[in-house]
């Protein structure tokens, strides 16, 4: 342990300070330090030189109020680097180790190499000129989510200045803003941008945690996405990005990871929480409190059933809304957060109740990934009002139908109309279902129609990682193909999947790059691939597919029948067999049924806009044929016009309508 080189802080300049707020708070005159630890016996505040390498002073915190250790340094200023050494017991669930330098859980900025034990918390000045920043506040019914990775989106973008590629500033650059607006999406959902660490195994194998689901600092933006020109002001760069996206009418949603931390299992590094008060911050195994309950598959589970841990999560969320102006959150493995002290999921428990009554958080977008890896962890449909949920049953049903799996037509109909079987029993609406066909986790759209199985060898885990339940197909050749028929079929299947997504009830989510035809060469778990395998290749973009996605989003926005606030009544939707009659029970239960039509009558929309005016729409007819044979579809009445056909664009309308194999068509009849 290196002793302090010299004293910069005389006892007379260490004041008592306050127990709140937690963290290091610059008040314009000095800095207040406050750290929670119930079981600590002694706490030392360590101050460092500007590079964070040399400890120049150690201040013992002698004041403790309600288990919060605190002091005030009147001579401290923003930019100061600091860490803590915490003394205490090491038996049972306690793992205090004063040889470890610990990060402040409330640090607003973290500098240095965290994995090497050189991570330092930094005092900041929060001043920023937001001007007339206004959140777009896009209603859920009008929301189109675009999931993207800050670095991967611009790292190879030829129109983004080289020094800004892969950064927050790059995401706010004019070429990116213009692209997002032209595409028609309304919200970008950023993969984790809270400070995170690379797992030891990855570092040893020359890999990195690319996705970022390994958080260590819940208040601090990840520095690896800061541009060189703003190295000392990453927070300002992040805020500028949000302000610029807001000016363009785009919401910013953060994918957040509060279910576990980057300290891993019992063999992992001691970086913060483990050394501050292990038995409080983590869910411990009652049979062996040196080990952790692992509902997340990452080695530990954050103990949000404890009031202090819950308060930290709530404070962090409010900080990102109030100070960083973000518009919502997608909660990774959300059931872990909602587990109570008995480890059971509780929709009326502390975490979900705290968010529901919070005046700041109750008004932002809240998205749950409604599953974790523990017993009782699959909770799709069980989150309370105000939440929306990633709907993996939608993903699986749409993939299965278009692959031609038997017996899928009935579930597809439920998914097209908002998954009422999942959400309506609890009084929820179509907005509760975030529909998606692909996400960061799994195959890209191109790979979904190009591979029968995963190819994750580059992850150096023997291809054992990643899901085997992909419901994908290569359509005749594993991987890239020069066969014109296979290429054409794959292109049509991509259009089918995308059109189904945009014409379904419930907010759709696209993953960035699917509209470009992006491939990960069959890797369905590219979490550790910070390489060109993951970065978007803009120069190889599929211009026709891009144009098609723009058309789909525009059609969705044009027709409120696809964006209902409430579930359609049985009489609002007519399901048609190819013969033009209503689908019979035999049609629904026949495993060989591969086609159906969905008729939406605009006059029966029966909804109103925000000002109370009746919403009207044209009659719409969606025809779907997942079979390998063409069929003739009898149309209900006359006057139909073709809006879109994934197999024959620009063709006219005849009755019966000739629907090619594995194709989708959308027809309209003006009222």
Image (cartoon, rainbow, N blue to C red):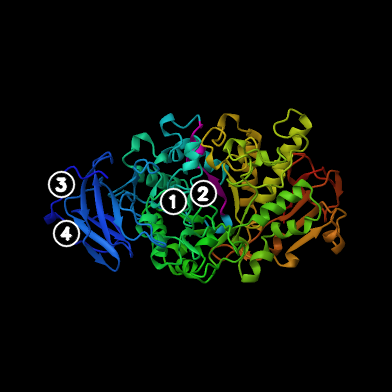
Q: How crowded is mark 1: few (under 14 residues within 10 Å), some or many (20 or more)?
A: many
| Location of residue 218 in the rendering, given as x and y in whole percent from the top left corner | 40, 53
Q: Can residue 362 be spotted in the picture?
A: yes
Q: Can residue 176 be spotted in the picture?
A: no
Q: In the rendered structure, does residue 373 fall within the stretch colored magenta? A: no
Q: Residue 7 carries which label?
A: 3
Q: Earlier in the sequence, mark 2 or mark 1?
A: 2
Q: Give the range drawn in magenta.
A: 143-157
Residue plotted at (65% across, 57% down): 505
Q: Earlier in the sequence, mark 3 or mark 4?
A: 3
Q: Which mark is residue 15?
A: 4
- The answer to whether 94 appears left or right of 580 in the picture is left
Q: Residue furthest front?
A: 91
Q: In the rendered structure, does residue 154 fall within the stretch colored magenta? A: yes
Q: Are marks 3 and 1 in contact (CB under 8 Å)?
A: no
Placement of 564 over or under 270, stated as above or below: below
Q: Are marks 2 and 1 in contact (CB under 8 Å)?
A: no
Residue plotted at (30% across, 56% down): 86
Rounded to the nearest whole Å, what is the CA distance between mark 3 and mark 4? 16 Å
Q: Earlier in the sequence, mark 4 or mark 2?
A: 4
Q: Nearer the viewer, mark 4 or mark 2?
A: 4
Rounded to the nearest whole Å, what is the CA distance between mark 3 and mark 1? 32 Å
Rounded to the nearest whole Å, what is the CA distance between mark 2 and mark 1? 25 Å
List the residue tagged with mark 2.
Answer: 189
Q: Which of marks 2 and 1 is in front?
A: 1
């Amino acid at each position: 342990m290196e002793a302090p080189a010299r004293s910069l802080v005389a006892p007379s300049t260490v004041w008592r300070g306050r127990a709140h707020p937690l963290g290091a708070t610059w008040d314009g005159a000095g800095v207040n330090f406050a750290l929670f630890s119930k079981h600590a016996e002694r706490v030392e505040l360590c101050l460092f030189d500007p590079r964070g390498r040399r400890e120049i002073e150690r201040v013992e915190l002698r004041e403790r109020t309600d288990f919060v250790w605190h002091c005030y340094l009147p001579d401290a200023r923003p930019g100061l680097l600091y860490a803590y050494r915490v003394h205490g017991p090491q038996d049972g669930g306690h793992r205090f180790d004063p040889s470890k330098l610990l990060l402040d859980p409330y640090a607003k900025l973290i500098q240095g190499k965290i994995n090497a034990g050189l991570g330092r918390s930094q005092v900041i000045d929060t001043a920023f000129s937001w001007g007339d920043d206004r959140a777009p506040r896009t209603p859920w019914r009008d929301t189109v989510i675009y999931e993207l990775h800050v670095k991967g989106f611009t790292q190879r973008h030829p129109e983004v200045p080289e020094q800004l590629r892969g950064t927050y500033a790059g995401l706010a650059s004019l070429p990116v803003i213009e692209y997002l607006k032209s595409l028609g999406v309304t919200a970008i959902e950023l993969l984790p941008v809270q400070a995170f660490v690379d797992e030891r195994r990855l570092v040893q194998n020359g890999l990195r945690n690319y996705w970022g689901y390994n958080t260590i600092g819940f208040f601090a933006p990840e520095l690896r996405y800061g541009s060189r020109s703003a190295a000392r002001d990453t927070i300002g760069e992040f805020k500028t990005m949000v302000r610029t996206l807001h000016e363009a009418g785009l919401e910013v949603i953060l994918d957040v990871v509060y279910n576990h931390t980057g300290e891993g299992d019992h063999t992992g590094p001691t970086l913060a929480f483990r050394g501050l008060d292990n038995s409080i911050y983590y869910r411990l195994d009652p049979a062996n409190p040196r080990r952790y309950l692992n509902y997340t598959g990452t080695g530990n589970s954050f103990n949000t059933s404890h009031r202090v841990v819950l308060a930290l999560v709530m404070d962090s969320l409010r900080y990102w809304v109030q100070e960083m102006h973000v518009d919502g959150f997608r909660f990774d493995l959300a059931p872990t957060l909602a587990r109570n002290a008995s480890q059971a999921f509780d929709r009326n428990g502390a975490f979900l109740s705290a968010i529901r009554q919070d005046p700041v958080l109750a008004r932002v977008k809240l998205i749950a990934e409604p599953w974790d890896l523990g017993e009782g962890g699959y909770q799709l449909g069980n989150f309370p009002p105000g939440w929306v949920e990633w709907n993996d049953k939608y993903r699986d049903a749409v993939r299965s139908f278009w692959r031609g799996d038997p017996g899928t037509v009935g579930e597809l109909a439920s998914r097209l109309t908002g998954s009422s079987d999942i959400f309506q029993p609890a009084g929820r609406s179509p907005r509760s279902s975030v529909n998606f066909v692909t996400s960061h986790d799994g195959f890209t759209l191109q790979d979904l129609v190009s591979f029968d199985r995963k190819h994750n060898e580059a992850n150096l885990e023997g291809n054992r990682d990643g899901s085997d339940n992909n419901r994908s197909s290569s359509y005749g050749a594993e991987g890239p193909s020069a066969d014109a028929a296979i290429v054409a079929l794959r292109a049509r299947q991509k259009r089918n999947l995308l059109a189904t997504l945009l014409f379904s009830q419930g907010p759709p989510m696209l993953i960035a790059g699917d509209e470009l035809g992006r491939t990960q060469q069959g890797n369905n778990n590219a979490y550790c691939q910070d390489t060109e395998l993951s970065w978007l290749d803009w120069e190889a973009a599929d211009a026709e597919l891009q144009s098609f996605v723009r058309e789909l989003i525009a059609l969705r926005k044009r027709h409120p029948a696809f964006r209902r606030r409430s579930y359609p009544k049985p009489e609002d939707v007519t399901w048609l067999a190819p013969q033009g009659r209503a689908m019979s029970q035999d049609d629904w239960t026949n495993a060989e049924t591969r086609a159906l039509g969905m008729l939406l009558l605009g006059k029966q929309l029966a909804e109103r806009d925000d000002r109370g005016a009746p919403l009207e729409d044209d009659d719409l007819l969606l025809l779907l044929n997942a079979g390998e044979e063409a069929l003739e579809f009898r149309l209900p009445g006359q006057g139909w016009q073709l809006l879109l056909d994934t197999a024959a664009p620009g063709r006219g309308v005849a009755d019966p309508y000739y629907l090619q194999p594995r194709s989708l068509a959308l027809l309209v009849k003006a009222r």
